[in-house]
Image (cartoon, rainbow, N blue to C red):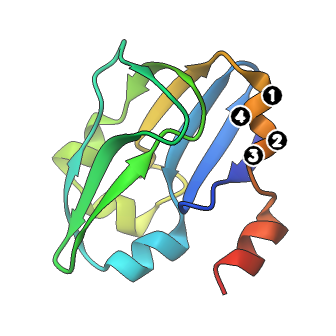
Amino acid sequence: MDIRFSADHEWIAIDGDTARVGITDHAQSLLGDIVFVELPSVGREVARGVAVSTVESVKAASDVYAPLTGTIIEVNSLAVEDPSVVNSDPMGAGWLFSIRFREPSELINLLSEVDYQRLSK
């Protein structure tokens, strides 16, 4: 599994033509205690760069963007039922949604972990 990052502070775990998406540890720490998560509907067609989800904390609400163009194939109901999991395990149990992507060429727009770390300092 290949892990990439977006400049919008999402992590993307790529496996074949699917990508699991969540917010980075850096993003969740900036937001603070997450109290609400809104996820897209399974089957929704999404375009890269479009807001598809919302994460709200006691400090602010933040959109989560589709890092790739495709179809939402799975959502994490645990993140809706217990939003604190996005804080406690953002790159594990706190994932948000999965996309079956159609444009592999869009992967070039994603960052390596090293590049993301430079960006978020």
Q: How far apart are marks 4 and 1 (CA)?
A: 13 Å
- Report the side of 15 relative to 65 (left or right): right
Q: Which quadrant holds the C terminus?
A: bottom right
Give the residue at mark 2.
108
Give the residue at mark 4.
14
Please, what is the three-letter code of the amino acid marked with disc 4?
Ile
Under circle 3, the secondary element is: helix
Return the x and y of residue 68 as percentages of the image width and height: 60, 33
Which one is in front in this view, the residue at disc 4 or the one at disc 1? 1
What residue is drawn where x is 64% and y is 79%? Answer: 120
Please, what is the three-letter code of the amino acid marked with disc 1?
Ser
Name the one closer to the observer, 34 or 81.
Answer: 34
Labels 2 & 3 near each other (Cβ < 8 A)? yes
Return the x and y of residue 58 as percentages of the image width and height: 16, 77
Under circle 1, the secondary element is: helix
| Chain-order first, disc 3 or disc 4 | 4
Give the class, few, some or many, for how many residues have Cα within 10 Å of label 4's Cα (few <14, many ≥20): some
Give the residue at mark 3.
109
Q: Is residue 1 visible?
A: no
Give the class, few, some or many, for how many residues have Cα within 10 Å of label 3's Cα (few <14, many ≥20): some
Under circle 2, the secondary element is: helix
Under circle 4, the secondary element is: strand
